[in-house]
Structure formats: structure tokens, C-alpha cells
Amino acid sequence: MTNLEPTVTPTIARPKAGFTTYAEKLNGRAAMIGFVAIVAIEYLTGKGIMTWLGLA
């Protein structure tokens, strides 16, 4: 009778792009830094971000 068990266990490579845990953490940190920067700009200049960018 033939042996149906695999002889080699495949290794699954972790993705280097896309929705990975590292990418999501990095995106969240960048968003937090951006939010704090916008609040700081509005506080220091006394104008909203839209005015500061020249859109309002």
C-alpha cells in the first residue's frame, strides 16, 4: 500500500505587503502623529487647517 502522508511540511511565507500587523500599526501611528500635528497647528496659528492650507 502507498504511504499518503506528506514527506515535507510546507512553510508558509509571511506577506511583506498588504494588510499585515506591522503595516496596520505603522498606519495607526502615522495617523496619530498627523492628528496631533493638525491640532498643534490650529492652536499655534489660531486658524483652522482649511484656512492654513488656503482652501477656505
Image (cartoon, grey):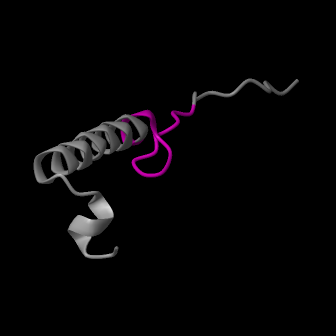
Position of residue 56 in the picture relative to residue 33 (left or right):
right
Residue 4 location, x and y as percent? 80, 27
Span shown in magenta = 10-23
* Depth check, front residue: 50 or 31: 50
Q: Quadrant of the C terminus?
A: bottom left
Disc count in the image?
A: 0
Residue 26 location, x and y as percent? 32, 40
| Identity of the residue drawn at 18% across and 44% down | 43
Q: Residue furthest front?
A: 46
| Identity of the residue drawn at 83% across and 27% down | 2
> Which of the 4 quarters of the picture holds residue 53?
bottom left
Residue 39 location, x and y as percent? 25, 43
Q: Quadrant of the N terminus?
A: top right
* Depth check, front residue: 53 or 56: 56
> Which of the 4 quarters of the picture holds residue 7?
top right
Position of residue 8 in the picture relative to residue 26 (left or right):
right
The relative height of residue 34 versus residue 22 in the rendered view (above or below) is below
**Would residue 14 be counted in the magenta stretch?**
yes
* Depth check, front residue: 42 or 8: 42
The relative height of residue 10 versus residue 54 in the rendered view (above or below) is above
Q: Residue furthest left?
A: 44
